[in-house]
Amino acid sequence: MTTLSATPAGAMPSIGRFRILRLLGRGNQSEVYLAHDPHLDRQVAIKTLLFAEVKDRAARMQDLLREARTVSRLSHPNIIALHDAGEHQGQPYLVFEYVQGRTLAEVLRESGPLSLPRAVEIAVQVLDAIACAHAQGIVHRDLKPSNILLDEQGVARVMDFGIATRIAGEGAPEGGLAGTPAYMAPEYVAGGVHGPRSDVYGVGLVLYEMLTGRPAIQGGSVQELLEKVTAARLPPPSAENPAVDERLDDIVLKAIARDPETRWHDAAAMRDALEGWLAPRPAAETAGAKQSTLEFLLRRMRLKSDFPALSEAISTINRIAGSDQDSVSQLSNAILKDFGLTNKLLKVVNSVSFVQYGGGNISTVSRAVVILGFNAVRNLAISLVLFENLQNKAQAAQLKEEFIRVLFSGMLAREMAGKAGVKDGEEAFICAMFHNLGRLLCLFYFPEESGEIRRQVETRGVDEDTAASQVLGLSFEELGMGIAKSWGLPEAITQSMRRLPAGRVRKGHTPTERLRILAGFSNELAQVIADGEPAQRGAEIERLSQRFGESLALNSRHLAEVVTRSLKEVREFSTAVNANFGQTAFARRADKWLGHPSEPESGARGNSTNGLADTLLAAPGPAAVHPEPVGAEGPSVAESHAALVAGLQEISNSLVNEDLKLNDILRMILETMYSAMGFHHVLFCMCDVKHNVMQGKFGFGEGFAELAARFRFPLASAPDVFHVALEKNVDILITDIDDPKITARIPEWYRQAVPARTFVIFPVLVKGKPVGLIYADKAKAGDIVIPEQLLSTLKALRNQAVLAIRQNL
């Protein structure tokens, strides 16, 4: 250490012109003294530095003086000013403003963790100081608690802007690394690089230590510390201090991210985030303003002709919750009301991508529910409704790209569900697809604003949600979650739209957290493929592995496999909904990303440049499973016959090979009749022995539940068509209930309960006793015409109902 100048007896020792009063502190490479400056008659703090034995001592001394002059220009209330620098007995020294107080390191040793507001307040003051220094091109390089002084008023003062650390580099351990190993930035340890984001990292470590009472990086040796700096996965502060909330966790973890590019881009950004945490706007005021903005945007959307229908369809399907028999009937009926939706859904569940999940050879929505599960079909229907309604020729290309990207995200999430700890792959599918709902709807309904958001991202360098907040008044996340709530979507789907924090993603502990993580990862990977270059694939995979490794158990080989499978499934899915996957930029980038050239799909040449309205949203072609009825004529005889035969075969196989519940079989029979024949209502009625009545139970068609409740008549003999059908076991078609020849046979309860003018009855008898009947109708007289070849198949379906009931007796 520096040797103090010899002085006469009783005189104080000196360093240069400064008279030493006492020792303030001592470190490995420096000592700090309280001294008196006789020229200006003031007290100062002098830091003496130990130079290692190096060849270029003179050059280093010049570097020190040059940097000291630069740092001395800093003037800020949270910076301890540097007054002077010099050399004494061959060793350099620095002269600082003297401030009474204690270092943050001393405070933490004595008191342990600070309160959350106090810790954040100190960090904000330090960041203010650092932002000032960075504005003048000065990087601290050595931020740690011992370099932060708390004065007598509790104000944080940053000292020692790393001059000594930089000058004494060759004398430091580990081959040129200078500073305190536990506070070195990963990029400095790995490559000797310091920059403004290194200081952000340092403040993050200091804040971590204030919140937890211990350093984030700990080890027994210098080598161990340095290895942890570059490789250790730091837990969030809340792991040590449960009082730390998720929002503050996210701010700290973003600051101490290993990759500098994922940290706060500068000290001011981190300071703003902490100030937002420290003094947020009143919750009611903020929530009220955002709610008003959301309602304004929703009003604008409702002015579009298709949005009310879209909202009603999604809300209706979503309100059908649970898995009881009524819910299954309601879900199937809601889907069957839209013949285009029915066709697309059945094409999807019969595509190769769904075979592994139980799909394939499914001709009714009811069977799809039985095989794939209630939630899978409901979620798939909601997804298809959303994209069925997104038609905008002006934004066709962008919407198509967005659809393919989110479709891939959904497929990827479904493929990875098991490894991510998510039990329901279909729920993961829809959560990933809806993760960016706000951006998708903005692109469709607010194309001009969407363009401005993209412009701000490209020109100003802000993130997408910041730009959206400035343009729309809401972030994409807030817009998507607001619309999802207005549609009544499940909480798991709504919460999965929340963006993940920067840095390493912690393991999810609840099903909702795991869904959110998986949805976030799937969309991030999709975005990497959409925007990235094949040459960066390895780096991007490594970045994602570091970010999600703890939460998703990733490895490169598995990731490549699921990406390949997911892309294959996207091709199948997009074909089912008439979206030409091969013509998208995403498809071409994905193929390059995987290392093989794009393969054009069948039909991709020639007239393959159709807009979105002609591809993704095109109406089903003539090969559709359920053709839409045309006026009174309904489906053609050939179409009806094909659908009836397909349903009959499927039901026969189910009776022989599958252990299905009776109501599942009956529902499949009714749906086959309803769809193939274009009936307005189809009901199954059962004999209630206790009350000696025939009562409607379930079925299909508009208002079927209310109709089933009203469809009730006594089993006591009466001269009407229903009793004749049951007592004589004959199928009866009534062409017109007001035909003079038949009007007397139509009971009064029917006329009051049912608005239909024509209907058909298929009695269901077991061992000669009536147990139920199948009823089907249309509104207008004469609309039901059943050729012989269709009648025989309808009777065969009724006989399947009889067989199913017998098997369950």
Image (spheres, helix red, strand yellow):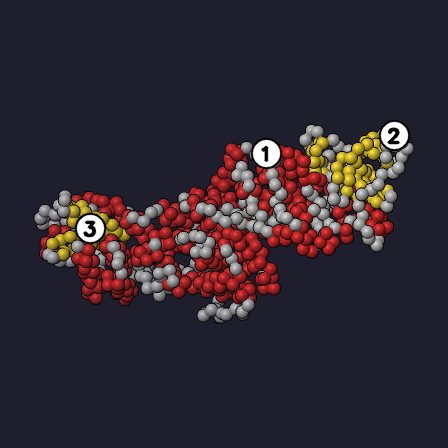
Q: Nearer the viewer, mark 2 or mark 3?
A: 2
Rendered residue at 83%/39% (across/down): 84
Q: Which residue is mark 1?
A: 115
* Earlier sequence position, callout 3 versus callout 1: 1
Q: Is residue 431 left or right of residue 589?
A: left
Crowd around label 1: few <14 · some 14–19 · many ≥20 (10 Å): some
Q: Amino acid at mark 2?
A: Gly
**Residue 768 on image: x %, y %:** 10, 56
- Tell me the tag on residue 685: 3
Describe the element under mark 2 as helix, strand or loop: loop
Describe the element under mark 3 as helix, strand or loop: strand
Q: Nearer the viewer, mark 3 or mark 1?
A: 1
Rendered residue at 32%/61% (across/down): 362
Q: Amino acid at mark 1?
A: Ser
Q: Which residue is mark 2?
A: 10
Q: Is residue 205 left or right of residue 393?
A: right
Q: Are marks 3 and 1 in contact (CB under 8 Å)?
A: no
Crowd around label 2: few <14 · some 14–19 · many ≥20 (10 Å): few
Q: Is residue 531 visible?
A: no
**Residue 23 on image: x %, y %:** 78, 35
Describe the element under mark 1 as helix, strand or loop: loop
Q: Amino acid at mark 3?
A: Cys
Q: Is residue 744 left or right of residue 684?
A: left
How far apart, in angstroms, are the residues tagged by discs 3 and 1?
A: 68 Å
Q: Quadrant of the C terminus?
A: bottom left
Vertically, is 36 above or below 622?
above
Q: Nearer the viewer, residue 12 or 512?
A: 12
**Residue 324 on image: x %, y %:** 29, 48
How far apart, in angstroms, are the residues tagged by discs 2 and 1?
A: 47 Å
Q: Are marks 2 and 1 in contact (CB under 8 Å)?
A: no
Q: Is residue 82 left or right of residue 394?
A: right
Rendered residue at 19%/64% (across/down): 792
